[in-house]
Structure formats: C-alpha cells, structure tokens
Image (cartoon, rainbow, N blue to C red):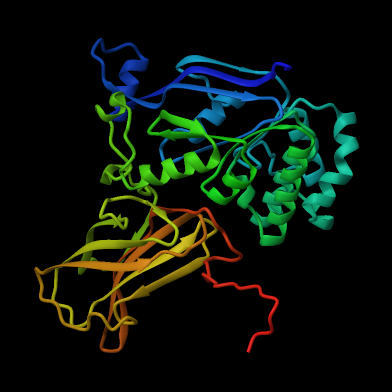
C-alpha cells in the first residue's frame, strides 16, 4: 500500500497572547521600565496536533473562541505560533478574510493581478485564469472601476473568485462559503466539489454542520484552544453537540483555569455596540440561555433558547415596551418581537423598580452567525420614546446539520409516494 503524503503537519502548536489590564502596562514592558510581569497569558491554542494528507478534506469545528481561525492563520503563515511547528507541502490559496489584500484605489482587474501575485502566481498563470475569474465573479463592467465604488456583495464576489479560481494545491477556507446570495453560494459549493474531484487538499472551518458532514473525510474538534478529538464527521458532530450542552468530558488540563462555553464570560459581547436613549429606563444586564439552562451564545438549530435582560427604571413609565431583534452579519433584520406585539406586558412601572424580561422561543434560523439587539421603548402622549437601545450587543451562533433555503427553516414534512394523493 502506497504511503500517503502529508500536505499539512502541525505538531504541539501553541498560540499565547499577552493580556494587559491597562495600556500603560504594555508600554512599560515594551520600554523595559518594569521587571514585574504586568500581563496574563491567554492561550488561543494549547498543544494542538493536526495532520492533513494530500487529497483529503478535513473540517475543524468548535465553539466560539476554540481556536479554529487561529490554527488556519498559523497554517497559512498569517500568524506565527508561540510554540510547536507547522510544515506545509503545496501551494496554498486561503479564504480567510476575503479581500484583505485588496487595494481600494485599484480597479478589479488590477486587484486580481495584485492578489494573484501575493499568492505566489506568475502573470502568465493569472492571465490563463482571468476569464474564469471574471465569469465566476459576474460583476460585469464594474471590474474596470475602483473597488472602493463596489457594493459589499460585488467586493466579496470578486475576492472569492480570485481565491478559488487560481488553482492551488491546498485550499484553506474559514466560513467563506456562506457569502453572497443563494445562487452565488451554489456556484461556490460546485467549485468546492470540483476541488475534491481533482484530489486537492482542503482544510476548512464552518458552523454549517451539514457542509462539514457532506464534504469532510475527517473532522477535528477544538474547544477553548485544546483538541478534544478527531474522527468521522458523524462522531465529531455528535461530540460537538455534547460540548454545547456541557455533557462532553473535557481533558483534565482544560478544566483547570479555563471557562466552558456555558460560562457567561464565554459569550461574545460587542465592544463597539451602538447605544442610545434617554436612560430613563436602562438595560443593566443581558444573556442567552440554551435549552439546558446554560449561558451560551451557541445554540443548536431547532432547540429552544431564552433571551434575558434586566431593566432598571429611573422614572415611572406608564407602558414600557421590551424588545429584541436578530440580524444577520450583513445587517439584515431577520426576526424579532416585543412585549406589545406579544401582548405580554402592558402595565405601568414605578421609578426604582427592576424588571427581568425573558423571551423564550424555538430557534429555527439557518446555521451561521447573527447579531442580537435589545431595546426598551414606549409611548408618552402618543409620542414614541426610546429609553435605551443596544444595537448588535452580542452574537448568536446557530449550529446546524441541515440548512434549507433562506433565513429560517420551514420544517417541511415531505412524502413521496406512487399513489395519487386525495
């Protein structure tokens, strides 16, 4: 039996970041003004081993903050590891941050050459692929305009077209297959299948477990920077779901000094959220619970979850309205409701009171990343007032092993028979 050739080999890879309490501590250390250790070390990866063989498709799954994107960036050379080693045998095309190497002043054609050259391809090789790139991107005459004039959709289409049509030996993908509309996604998946048929090596990260299950030969499960296991897609997807509900036995070293995904600190909060309002009623705290009652921003599609917020009232308000909205990462409002629509609370609240609000629902959104916004509003003498709004306050990751068309699942019951119906 012929020995399989290794495309990617990562051994005992670690990536540590220094966390400082304040910027002055970082400055003092940089200038050598302090002998005292002024930082804490956070390990994004800790002793991770990864082997990918040529012609193999390997997926990496895990909760937010598990180190999935970090390992991809180390493999592609974007980041240097703190410890361990990585070797790559083959030319890489990486779909990590689409368009990160684009010059906004250049037109589309110039950026195709710029990106292709950065990937290590010659002008002759890029010329040979130009028609395929332009056809795949399908942005027409805009390709001759500066990319700063592009819509976000056109920008993404061109970036993806460049990365995937210049033939690499190894394709590295980080959630990039969810770009564009459903027709463009279909085109991307078709190209992905072509890569597999050609025997290319593929390493990719996704929250879409249906894609992981469909395309991967093998799956690696990470959690908080530690490799929990690897195996068949079904085995690792089942283990991942156990991790999400806190029922997977974690390695002893991970249990010490590390928080689980169900710890409130593991939720991804937005430091740049938009906040405004009179503050006559103020949202003091908020979190999401999964169907097991654990704090978590990762929810399994089709399961029940709860969105909680606590509101303190600085003045008496006759009819406060509590609301939440869920948007996708492009800013499109997908769903939401409030206590007035639901006829759940139509009472006055006295100054100094604190109210705890819970929205419970089954979450049938497609697998992917979403943003949560919260609000307290109301009407005073027929005038609409905003007391406190928090836009894009935290993320929600929906974990799915079946994605249908559009934003949410219709949960259709399907039957196919030989007999006429009715």
Where's the C terminus, which quadrant? bottom right
Provide residue 398's location: percent of width, then percent of height.
45, 54
Please name the residue shown 28% across and 31% down the image.
258
378 left or right, relative to 81: left
Quadrant of residue 98 within the rendered picture: top right
Total numbered badges shown on the rendered structure: 0
Residue 385 can be seen in this image: yes
Q: Residue furthest front?
A: 419
Please name the residue shown 23% across and 68% down the image.
357
Where's the N terminus, which quadrant? top right
Please name the residue shown 10% across and 72% down the image.
351
Provide residue 119's location: percent of width, then percent of height.
73, 29
Please name the residue shown 85% across and 45% down the image.
132
> Compared with residue 282, is residue 245 higher up or lower down, i.e. above or below?
above
> Compared with residue 42, is residue 191 higher up or lower down, i.e. above or below?
below
In the foreground, 301 or 182: 301
> Compared with residue 398, is residue 356 higher up or lower down, i.e. above or below?
below
Provide residue 151's location: percent of width, then percent of height.
67, 57
Provide residue 125's location: percent of width, then percent of height.
87, 31
89 left or right, relative to 288: right
Residue 208 can be seen in this image: no
């Amino acid at each position: 039996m012929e020995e399989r050739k290794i495309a990617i080999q990562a051994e005992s890879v670690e990536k540590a970041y220094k966390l400082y309490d304040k910027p002055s501590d970082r400055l003092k250390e940089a200038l050598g003004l302090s002998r005292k250790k002024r930082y804490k070390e956070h390990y994004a990866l800790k002793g991770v081993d990864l082997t990918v063989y040529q012609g193999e498709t390997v997926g990496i799954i895990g909760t937010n903050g598990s180190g999935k994107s970090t390992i991809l960036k180390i493999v592609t050379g974007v980041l240097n590891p703190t410890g361990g080693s990585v070797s790559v045998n083959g030319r890489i095309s990486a779909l990590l941050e689409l368009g990160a190497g684009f010059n906004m002043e250049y037109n589309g054609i110039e950026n195709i050459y710029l990106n292709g050259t950065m990937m290590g391809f010659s002008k002759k090789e890029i010329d040979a692929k130009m028609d395929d790139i332009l056809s795949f991107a399908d942005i027409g005459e805009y390709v001759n305009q500066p990319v700063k004039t592009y819509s976000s959709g056109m920008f993404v289409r061109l970036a993806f077209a460049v990365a995937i049509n210049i033939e690499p030996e190894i394709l590295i993908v980080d959630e990039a297959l969810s770009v564009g509309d459903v027709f463009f996604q279909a085109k991307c998946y078709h190209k992905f299948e072509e890569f597999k048929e050609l025997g290319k090596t593929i390493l990719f990260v996704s929250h879409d477990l249906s894609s992981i299950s469909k395309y991967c030969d093998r799956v690696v499960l990470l959690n908080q920077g530690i490799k929990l296991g690897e195996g068949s897609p079904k085995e690792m997807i089942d283990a991942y779901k156990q991790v999400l509900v806190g029922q997977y036995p974690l390695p002893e070293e991970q249990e010490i000094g590390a928080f689980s995904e169900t710890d409130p600190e593991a939720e991804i909060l937005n430091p740049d959220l938009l906040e405004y309002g009179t503050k006559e009623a103020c949202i003091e705290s908020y979190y999401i619970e999964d169907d097991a009652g654990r704090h978590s921003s990762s929810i399994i599609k089709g399961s029940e979850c709860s969105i909680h917020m606590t509101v303190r009232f600085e003045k008496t308000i006759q009819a406060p309205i509590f609301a939440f909205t869920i948007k996708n990462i492009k800013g499109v409002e997908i769903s939401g409701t409030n206590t007035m629509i639901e006829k759940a609370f139509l009472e006055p609240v006295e100054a100094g009171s604190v109210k705890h609000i819970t929205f419970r629902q089954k979450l049938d959104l497609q697998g992917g990343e979403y943003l949560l916004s919260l609000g307290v509003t109301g009407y005073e003498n027929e005038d609409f007032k905003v007391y406190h709004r928090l836009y894009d306050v935290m993320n929600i990751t929906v974990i799915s092993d079946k994605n249908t068309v559009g934003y949410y699942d219709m949960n259709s019951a399907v039957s196919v028979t030989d007999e006429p119906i009715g």
